Amino acid sequence: MSNTFPLSLIAATVFVSMSAVAAPPQGYPSDYQSVIDAATKEGKVVVYSTTDIKAAGPLVKGFEATYPGIKVEYNDMNSTELYNRFISEQASGGTSGDVVWSSSMDTGLKLATDYAQEYKSPELAQLPKWAVWNNKAYGTTYEPVVFIYNKRMIPAGDVPDSHAALAKLIASQTDKFKSKVTTYDIEKSGLGFMLSVQDAKADPNYFKTLADVAKGGLAVQSSTGTMMERVSSGENLIGFNILGSYAEARAKTDPSLGIAYPKDYTLVLSRVSFISQQAQHSHAAKLWLDYVLSEKGQTILANQADIPSLRNDIEGKNDIDGLTKMLGNALKPIPVDESLLEYLQPKKRLDYIKQWRTAAGK
């Protein structure tokens, strides 16, 4: 049997298929088709991200299905590596990421102030005002920062529901918690540094609280994954300043991992994304950013990647509305604005790290 088909038929089939799929989303500007066509000619988009590929996989798959002529070259790194690599590549004039997507909001915004191109996304009206900076940098998620604990070794009645309760628990049982409390190493993790600064802004007693939490000795790490693994195994008993999205995803299959949302205040992180001024695939980058912010992309993040949506029109509870019903006024979203840059000034950063190390006993 012959498997040969007329080229005209194949071309027509491909054209119909591409036209049916790669069309502007409903409600987008009429000239958006030109962006899609130009992006398809570019053929790919290069994403530099701190979101691990396991979590981002469904989003990449959804994007490539929506725009089958465009491949996603996804580079997963920690926040410090992303920052240093992107700056180095911009300075050398070599190839680099078209899109940056960072959980370290302060360093992400710092990069955006120097390297982002202005782009007004068609999704702008669906986003909270605090999540958009000068139509250049966009918050993309709504992720509470939580405590994690070992359910086998921390009685339900001891689980802390506030930062003060966490400090009181550890300070009252220093032998039990000796070297068993984990958090980010703020010198090695840009995300950890940013969250610590936001804690200090939210809580005037932060450094006293930190000193009490550290009375048993802190085991600091540079990644959420390592902290969750050690708490689950019992090597550590409790952790704080953990991304709730990753914790919730792991807890679904890990019966040892417990999660507590602090009721005094719960910081909410929003991963910052922007398109590079020097993007080699700038049209594909626009499609990617818009897809991440769209109802379709946010639904994938919320319901397949367990990363809460910053929209309020997503099916299910994993969005702003759902989390507000659960935590109410305790939620403290970190705004995407210039306030993030304050502690990136070298002297202020160094002084802050010294103060943190003193309180943490490091």
Image (cartoon, rainbow, N blue to C red):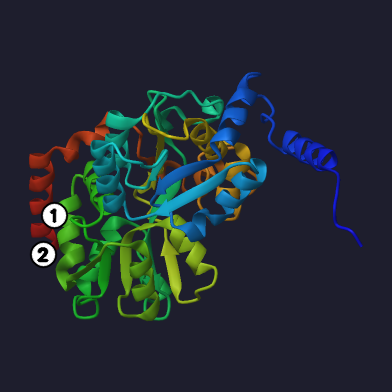
Q: How many marks?
A: 2
Q: Secondary structure at mark 1?
A: helix
Taking the image as shown, residue 175 lies to the left or right of residue 30, namely left
Rate crowding at label 1 as few (under 14), some (14 to 19) or many (20 or more) other CA atoms within 10 Å.
Answer: many
Is residue 198 visible to the viewer in this orientation of the structure?
A: no
Taking the image as shown, residue 100 lies to the left or right of residue 352, namely right
Mark on residue 356?
Answer: 1
Q: Nearer the viewer, residue 234 or 282?
A: 282
Mark on residue 324?
Answer: none
* x and y, in percent, of residue 358 in the image: 8, 58
Taking the image as shown, residue 82 lies to the left or right of residue 64, namely left
Instruction: Give above or below for 103 relative to 173.
Output: above
Rendered-image quadrant of the N terminus: bottom right
Q: Which residue is mark 2?
A: 362
Rate crowding at label 2 as few (under 14), some (14 to 19) or many (20 or more) other CA atoms within 10 Å.
Answer: few
At horizontal 36% and vertical 42% (from top left) the residue drawn is: 96
Whether label 1 touches label 2, CB < 8 Å: yes
* x and y, in percent, of residue 42 in the image: 53, 35
